[in-house]
């Protein structure tokens, strides 16, 4: 039941295109989604824009106890 609750929370909390750090979604899924969007735009003659972010050190300056408290308040379990 907890897994179902977590999946439901993730489905409503995150955008459908979000792939990172979500159970059941992989890098391969993200690539397939991106390729499909590019092909769709090309078929319609529409421009498509890519925005890439590098979050490799995004959490280095975050106090982890604050981040953990925030995640718990959202329903994520302790480690």
Image (cartoon, rainbow, N blue to C red):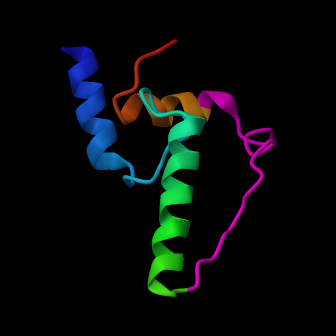
Residue 31 position, x and y percent, is 58, 47
Residue 50 in magenta? yes
Identify the residue at image location x=75%, y=46%. 58
**Vertical comparison of 76 with 28: above or below:** above
- Where is residue 28, by image quadrant? top right
Residue 20 lies left or right of residue 58; in this view the side is left
- Image check: 29 left or right of 51? left
| Number of callouts | 0
Residue found at x 48% / y 37%: 70
Q: In this picture, is 23 found above or below 74?
A: above
Q: Which residue is at the front of the view, 2 or 20? A: 20
Residue found at the far front of this picture? 43
Q: Give left or right: position of 57 versus 47.
A: right
Over which residues does the magenta segment extend?
Answer: 47-65
- Is residue 34 or residue 5 the one in the foreground? 34
**Quadrant of the image for the N terminus?**
top left
Residue at far left of view: 1
Residue 67 at x, y percent in the picture: 58, 35
x and y percentages locating residue 44 in the rendered image: 44, 84
Closest to the observer, 61 or 2:
2
Q: Relative to residue 55, is residue 69 drawn left or right?
A: left
- Residue at (46, 34) in percent of width and height: 25
Q: Position of residue 17 (x, y in %)?
A: 44, 54
- Please determine whether, in this image, residue 4 is positioned above or below residue 33: above
Q: Is the stretch drawn in magenta largely helix, strand or loop?
A: loop
Q: Quadrant of residue 15?
A: bottom left
């Amino acid at each position: 039941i907890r897994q179902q609750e977590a999946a439901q929370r993730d489905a409503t909390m995150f955008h459908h295109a979000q792939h990172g750090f979500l159970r059941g979604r992989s890098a391969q899924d993200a690539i397939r989604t991106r390729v499909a969007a590019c092909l769709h735009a090309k078929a319609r003659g529409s421009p498509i824009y890519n925005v890439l972010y590098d979050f490799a050190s995004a959490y280095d300056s975050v106090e982890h106890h604050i981040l953990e408290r925030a995640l718990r308040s959202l329903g994520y379990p302790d480690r």
